[in-house]
Image: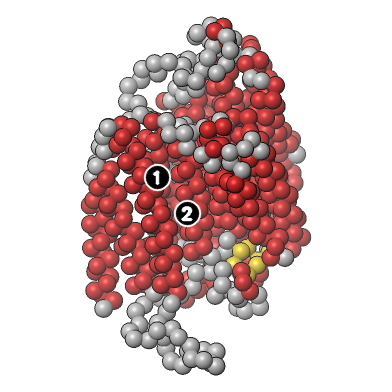
Amino acid sequence: METLLSLTVGLLFAAAIYLMLARNVLRFLFGMILLSNAANLLIFTAGRLTFGAPPLIPEGADLPMSDVANALPQALVLTAIVIGFGLFAFALMLVFRAYATMGTLNSDDMRLAEPVSDDLPPTASPAFDPPTKGSRT
Amino acid sequence: MSWLIIAPILIPFATAIIAFLLRDKAVAKWVSVAGSALGLLAAGLLMAEVLRQGVVAAQMGNWAAPFGITFVADLLSGVMVVITAITGLAVAIYASGEVSHRMEQLGYHTLFQVLLAGVTGAFLTGDIFNLYVWFEVMLISSFGLLILGGRPEQIDGGVKYVTLNLISTVLFLSAVGLLYGMTGTLNMADLSIAVERVDNQGLLTVVAMMFMVAFGVKAAVFPLFFWLPAAYHTPTFSVSAVFAGLLTKVGVYALIRVFTLIFDHDIGYTHTVLLWVAGFTMVTGVLGAAAQMDFRKILSFHIISQIGYMILGLALYTPLALAGSVFYLVHHIVVKANLFLVAGVAERLAGSTDLRRIGGLYTHAPLVSVLFLIPAFSLAGFPPLSGFWAKYILVKASLEGEYWFIAFVALAVGLLTIYSMTKIWSEAFWTPHPDKIKPTLSRLTRAERWRLLTPIAGLATLTVIIGLYPEPFVQFAERTATQLLDPSAYVAAVLGGRP
């Protein structure tokens, strides 16, 4: 079972990296969510798998009676899922805004912050108001 | 005791909540300033305790280490928390004069305080998974701050910043998972013992490299730094100042922590890689800066080249070199945040950050010129400012270790730093303004002048103090380095009597 899961993790990582190499930012995001799921599965597998032994302690005892499953990796995965979900929602919204602003999803064409040409910017600054013209806005 | 160590984290969180509730009102900015001042007080108290005791540790919920989450403050964490609080206070004051009411309504102060809490938490935690969580707290608030206002350049820079940082956190998470699978623990002090028991030391090196790449993205080292110059010049100046000062330094801190405490099993390999990385980071950063014509873009590339110096100290792995790294970290945060704040004032006075569009600041605003010169000279390493001592220690350490070439690179990069600082100086300050505008300080209202210039003057004073009285700071850095190289005190404080 661990071998199977390890192979799945590897496959997910490979698919995620393939998707993330695309210039299309949306494909990149899909790769990203695969990658974070692959990482979650990786933690789960790295914590070793135990079958049919939930980590429950009988009433009155301080310790479990026999070997039980390790609950810690699952707690970690749960935390990582929640965080990953939040970040993914943000990233999706950001990419949507980027598409609305720049009209493209191709990362090569997203050059607003680092323009290719060395021309001067058209105006000094939209908010700038020379003192000769009077009051500040 | 445990209150002392979590107060620097709780205060910014509490401030964030209050600022959130008050975000429509004009008082939110003062809440932010007051919270930051209180945070500085708490950081100072913690630092005093650390200086007295060596290492302070607190177990959350009284779950004994290594089972619960531990917070640890050793000398390195302590000084990082203090410098974070100082930067936080300076930027909070500056933001009160800079940030528009619209951005305040969108929650600027809340995000800013959560960012400070995330950075402080990352410095104080003693648990590697918890470090991941603090990284995320820091990241999500930095995402918000970066795109707050929503100008097209900000969105564009944001896409690059967000995507590359997400990859780095997933890599970090995977590395944590694998390390846990090998050692069965997440507590960093426990890990430093447990890694010795791992059968396959080669696999451990692989995980170490995963950590190096993950933290390397955060720290913006060669060849992983591309998100930084794409994003840092786009947000508001107070935001870029706090990013420039603190965010990459969390990556450097994490590298120093992990590669002194946990992965010191194969120094010949890992630290040689770090040495190459340091050299290339210094050179590419400074060359990138030489090619730019924008105030903030030049400064952004300089962050990268300076990160190289800090990594250099870690890579050499001698007491003196690590002391140099620690000294450099502290000096760099103060100086770099300050330069971005000065860039903000220059933009307000002269109308742009593009060096070809501004000028005349020296004639019309001599005070701003002096306040620029101090951190700029310090960054380039002029004696007697703080940057000189930082570079001096690192070069001395490289020469002592007989790394002649890297010492030469460090010196040459210093020279090139002066070159691009000169470029800013001559274009923004010396040449007359191309549009014949007079960039005098009277362009700011009286209140704005106080709020924008006080933090700059404060940070500049700190630079001068470190430069003129370096002795206590160097001694402190040496103590920190000794503590980093011999983690027994750290381990004992966390795990108690348990071996």
Give whichever of discs 1 and 2 has the lower sequence position: 2
Left or right of B132, for residue A50: left
> What x and y, as percent, mark residue A17?
26, 53
Q: Can residue A112 be seen in this view?
A: yes
Query: Callout 2, which amino acid?
Result: Glu
Q: Would you place residue A54 above or below residue B91 in this image? A: below
**Which residue in the protein does label 2 denote?**
B136
Q: CA separation, marks 1 and 2?
A: 12 Å
**Badge 1 element:** helix
Toward which corner of the image does residue A7 lie, by quadrant? bottom left
Toward which corner of the image does residue B182 lie, by quadrant? bottom left
Q: Would you place residue A128 above or below residue B321 in this image? A: above
Query: Callout 1, which amino acid?
Result: Val
Front residue (pair B322, B44): B44
Q: Can residue B285 be seen in this view?
A: no
Q: Would you place residue B434 above or below residue B412 in this image? A: above
**x 42%, y 88%: residue:** A67
Subunit bearing disc 2:
B
Toward which corner of the image does residue A16 lie, by quadrant? bottom left
Front residue (pair B259, B119): B119
Which image quarter holds the C terminus of chain B? bottom right
Left or right of B203, for residue B458: right
- Return the mark for residue B162: 1
